[in-house]
Amino acid sequence: MQLEDVQCVTVLGAGNMGHGIAEVAALAGYDVSLRDINEEFVQDGYDGIEWSLGKLVEKNRIGEAEADAALDRVETFVDLEESLADADVVIEVVPEKMAIKTDVYEEVVEFAPEEAVFVTNTSSLSITELSEVTDRPERFCGMHFFNPPVRMDLVEVISGEHTSEETLELIEGLAESMDKTPVRVRKDSPGFIVNRILVPLMNEAAWIVESGDATIEAVDSTTKFDMGLPMGSFELADQVGIDVGFHVLEYMHEVLGDAYRPCPLLAEKVEEGNLGKKTGSGFYDYEDGDGAQIP
Ligand code: 3HC
């Protein structure tokens, strides 16, 4: 498949990242089939796209006509077979658990067009292992976006052991066509590049607070203002989802060892269901819409 042949992108999973990626693809002019397992999830995803496009218009990043045209290109589905009917590229964005992803791929291979290319937005899991569940491991790679996808330029393009050079070039081209900057990750290792660096930063911040050495606000004000990062470590954890960071850490801990042991503070938030912005509360409260208050 050549980039010119790509017309329809199917995004599986309408959560935080899924709907953001669908929005990016629609803004780039692709027809988008957005699918999730029930009407509520898929409608929430669609509403998320509408909200985000509205914000982009409000901030003069795009015009109203562009936003309307992008929204028109998004079709929502619950039926997996229907969502895959026209797919040239399938972007899988389901929860960060190997068992869930492999179950999804087992179904996807039944219905996806033979020539479609598969990519996963996994944050850390093995591309090679996922590709081996499919009938096309050479046309399978990682395409890892960052949160929020519509505002973050970077996309990691990760090669599995079986991925062909043509597939990597196609997906790099696809990322560029979406106005993103692809960075190729040659080796399929846990967390790839960004999360291998960023998630331990969030974990270490949690350990500092857990051990009583500093407050959340003090840690965030140092990372944000003195280290010059766009968000404090805890703000960032709330932005990406504390559960997402936690699952990445659990996997890195299992594969890479004790240096990546998740801090109990993160586990507590996950158990309570306080996962960050998406649930209205995490390390900070968002219910009133003003988010983190950093001194
Ligand atoms: N769509 C549209 N607008 C959005 C949005 C979205 N998805 N998300 C936030 N906004 C809006 C906000 O609501 C806010 O609007 P408001 O002022 O009316 O409330 C506005 O954007 C803020 O934008 P600004 O340009 O004014 O603010 P910033 O310059 O602070 O930029 C940011 C915001 C781009 C999110 C910036 O804070 C940033 O870069 N943060 C770091 C994010 C990051 O590092 N992400 C990667 C995480 S790692 C990851 O995702 C990998 C995963 O696998 C774990």
Image (tube, grey):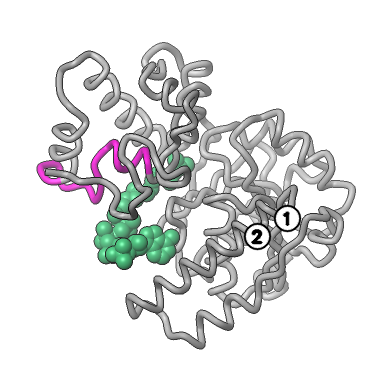
113 with respect to 33 (left or right) = right
Residue 252 x %, y %: 48, 23
Give the alpha-carbon distance from disc 1 to disc 2, as whole Å: 6 Å
**In the figure, is residue 213 to the left or right of 285?**
left
Q: Quadrant of the N terminus?
A: bottom right
Residue occupying the point 38% across, 48% down: 287
Asked if the stretch drawn in magenta spans residue 163, the answer is no
Disc 1 Cβ-to-ligand 1 distance below 8 Å = no
Q: Is residue 59 above or below residue 234?
A: below
> Can you tell me whether the CB of the residue at mark 2 lies under 8 Å from the nearest atom of ligand 1?
no
Q: Residue at x 52, y 51 (%)?
A: 16
For the record, the magenta segment spans 225-238
- In the image, what residue type sits under mark 1? Glu
For the C terminus, which image quadrant? top left
Q: Secondary structure at mark 2?
A: helix
Identity of the amino acid at label 2? Gln
Instruction: Report the side of 52 relative to 118 (left or right).
Output: left
- Please state the horizontal and vertical placement of residue 166, each as a whole percent of the image: 66, 57
Dot 1 and dot 2 residues touching (CB under 8 Å): yes
Which residue is at a point 42% across and 43% down the rendered structure image?
240
Q: Which x, y percent locates residue 15?
A: 58, 50
Q: Residues within 10 Å of mark 2 (few under 14, many from 20)?
A: some
Please identify the residue farthest to the front as the structure is shown. Answer: 288
Question: What residue is rendered at 47% in x and 46% in y?
Answer: 278
Residue 221, quarter of the rendered image:
top left
Q: For the residue labelled by badge 1, is the local secondary structure a helix, a strand or a loop? A: helix
For disc 2, the marked residue is: 43
Q: Which numbered marker is on residue 39?
A: 1
Q: Residues within 10 Å of mark 1 (few under 14, many from 20)?
A: some
**Outermost residue, right direction?**
110
Q: Nearer the viewer, residue 204 or 167?
A: 204
Residue 26 higher or lower than 283, as above or below? below
